[in-house]
């Protein structure tokens, strides 16, 4: 089994205002950078190699953590298409019935012009297989959409209801990868404080 530790980037101004970011690439907010500068990786991941999404907010977070990641395109955030820059609350208010139908699709929830969690899983699988084959403990700085897709792979959650465990921000989540790349959640919500 191969250890795989994953965390979400620190907040941006868009996170703070509830806007869907997707592939848009805002930097960390002043508050987000200050928070990440106070994060420290737990001893459990000492010596791990690190990967990061190519988006600036993930790379900035890695810099704050003093890790030098390899950029991994498979870790990029889920594409929100036409909804990027909007809030879910505004989208739900504008079309409550349509949004309800789309959100009820779980893994097949797909914003117009965007990407479903199932598609995120499809692009994660080859990476997980590669990491399992290489058998090197690995950490990753990524995004909420990627973390949720990974959790669904690890637990069988269909994303149509509440998750089996809430993956909190500003926390590290530890998975292990079977030889075929199948993830299993070992421990969620490991503190990053100093």
Image (cartoon, grey):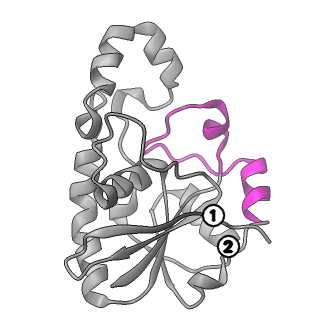
User: Does the stretch in magenta take in 36?
Assistant: yes
Residue displayed at 49% across by 34% down: 20
Nearest to the observer: residue 1 or residue 94: 1
Residue placed farthest to the front in the image?
164
Task: Identify the mark at residue 97; answer none if there is no mark.
Answer: none
Residue displayed at 32% across by 63% down: 74
Q: Is residue 158 above or below residue 175?
A: above
Residue 194 position by quadrant = bottom right
Please name the residue that numbered disc 2 is placed on: 65
| Left or right: residue 175 compared with residue 67 | left
Q: Is residue 167 above or below residue 172?
A: above
User: Does the stretch in magenta take in 158?
Assistant: no
Which type of secondary structure does the marked residue at label 1 adopt?
helix
Nearest to the observer: residue 150 or residue 68: 150
- Residue 123 screen position, x and y as percent: 24, 59
Nearest to the observer: residue 164 or residue 82: 164
Mark 2, Cα crowd under 10 Å, few <14 / some 14-19 / many 20+, is: some
Residue displayed at 52% across by 48% down: 166
Nearest to the observer: residue 73 or residue 129: 129
- Residue 186 screen position, x and y as percent: 45, 70
- Residue 184 screen position, x and y as percent: 35, 68
> Which region is colored magenta?
11-37
- Residue 92 screen position, x and y as percent: 44, 15
Mark 1, Cα crowd under 10 Å, few <14 / some 14-19 / many 20+, is: many
| Left or right: residue 64 compared with residue 134 | right
Q: Is residue 134 above or below residue 7?
A: below
Residue 108 position by quadrant = top left
Please name the residue that numbered disc 1 is placed on: 61
Residue displayed at 29% across by 26% down: 104
Which type of secondary structure does the marked residue at label 2 adopt?
loop
Which quadrant would the N terminus be assigned to in this image?
bottom left
Q: Are marks 1 and 2 in contact (CB under 8 Å)?
A: yes
């Amino acid at each position: 089994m191969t250890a795989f530790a994953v965390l979400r980037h620190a907040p941006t101004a868009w996170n703070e205002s509830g806007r869907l970011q997707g592939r848009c690439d805002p930097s960390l907010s002043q508050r987000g950078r200050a928070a990440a500068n106070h994060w420290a990786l737990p001893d459990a991941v000492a010596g791990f190699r690190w990967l990061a999404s190519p988006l600036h907010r993930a790379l900035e977070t890695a810099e704050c953590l003093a890790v030098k990641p390899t950029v991994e395109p498979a870790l990029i955030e889920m594409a929100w298409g036409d909804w990027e820059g909007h809030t879910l609350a505004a989208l739900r208010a504008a079309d409550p019935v349509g949004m309800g139908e789309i959100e009820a699709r779980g893994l097949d929830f797909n914003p117009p012009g965007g990407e479903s969690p199932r598609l995120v899983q499809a692009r994660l699988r080859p990476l997980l297989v590669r990491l399992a084959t290489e058998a090197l403990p690995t950490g990753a700085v990524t995004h909420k959409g990627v973390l949720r897709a990974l959790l669904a792979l690890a637990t069988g959650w269909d994303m149509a209801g509440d998750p089996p465990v809430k993956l909190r921000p500003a926390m590290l989540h530890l998975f292990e990868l079977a030889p075929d790349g199948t993830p299993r959640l070992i421990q969620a919500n490991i503190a990053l404080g100093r």
